[in-house]
Amino acid sequence: MASLQDQLKQAGLINEKAAKQIQKDKRKQTKQAHKSKQVVVDETKQSVQAARAEKAERDRELNRQRQAEAEQKAIAAQIKQLIETHRQPKLARGEAELEYNFTDGKTIKKLLVSAKVQQQLMRGQLAIAKLGEGHELVPRIVADKIALRDSDSIILAKTQATDEPDEDDPYKDYVIPDDLMW
């Protein structure tokens, strides 16, 4: 295999004199490096190493993004499975329908539920979870597990409130009924 200089000569890009001058300059450079014991800096090697390091960093960042997306998908699948396996019926056959209003973000939504389910929602035994575009009822324990994974999936989860008002509450003398329908 011919050297690069031989190939350039055959192609007519350089002549014999220019090839000898390049070899002479290269020998001088290496001789000076040995005499002064300085490391000859090869700019092409440095640029190749910098490009490799930059590519490796981009690859690491891309892998981090892919891993984060995969984790989000896994969490969403876990939430969906928890809701689907533990969802509670909203109405039992033959029971009267009551409207239960709640807020989802900035909009007011309503569910048709039975009186028993309404009481469980008010006591905090059941919670409302968002599944796709709909809403499902899940037990409080399951709602807590879902909230650990993604708090935005739980729309309404009342906590057991203490009956004692704060000492400095100006409205402590006014009792608000729990069964207030709105």
Image (tube, rainbow, N blue to C red):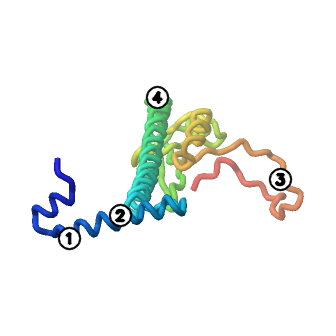
Tag in front: 2 or 4:
2
Between discs 2 and 1, the one toward the N terminus: 1
Between discs 2 and 3, the one toward the N terminus: 2
Where is mark 4, residue-wise? 85
User: Which residue is located at x 65 percent, y 47 percent?
Assistant: 179
Q: How many marks?
A: 4
Question: Dot 2: what SS?
Answer: helix
Q: Amino acid at mark 3?
A: Pro
Instruction: Give the camera-side residue of 105 and 172.
Output: 105
Q: Would you call the spot at circle 3 few (<14 residues within 10 Å), some (14-19), or many (20 or more)?
A: few
Question: Dot 1: what SS?
Answer: helix
Q: Is residue 98 left or right of residue 170?
A: left
Distance between the alpha carbons at the discs numbered 2 and 3: 90 Å
Q: Amino acid at mark 1?
A: Lys
Determine the image quadrant of residue 143.
Answer: top right
Please provide percent x and percent y for residue 126.
59, 37
User: Which residue is located at x 53 percent, y 61 percent?
Assistant: 38
Do the residues bearing badges 3 and 1 touch, measured as CB atoms within 8 Å?
no
Instruction: Give the camera-side residue of 46 and 141.
Output: 46
Where is mark 2, residue-wise? 26
Distance between the alpha carbons at the discs numbered 1 and 4: 84 Å
Where is mark 3, residue-wise? 165
Do the residues bearing badges 1 and 4 touch, measured as CB atoms within 8 Å?
no
Between discs 1 and 4, the one toward the N terminus: 1
Tag in front: 3 or 4:
4
Find the residue positioned furthest to the left.
11
Please provide percent x and percent y for residue 9.
14, 63
Distance between the alpha carbons at the discs numbered 2 and 4: 76 Å
Do the residues bearing badges 3 and 4 touch, measured as CB atoms within 8 Å?
no
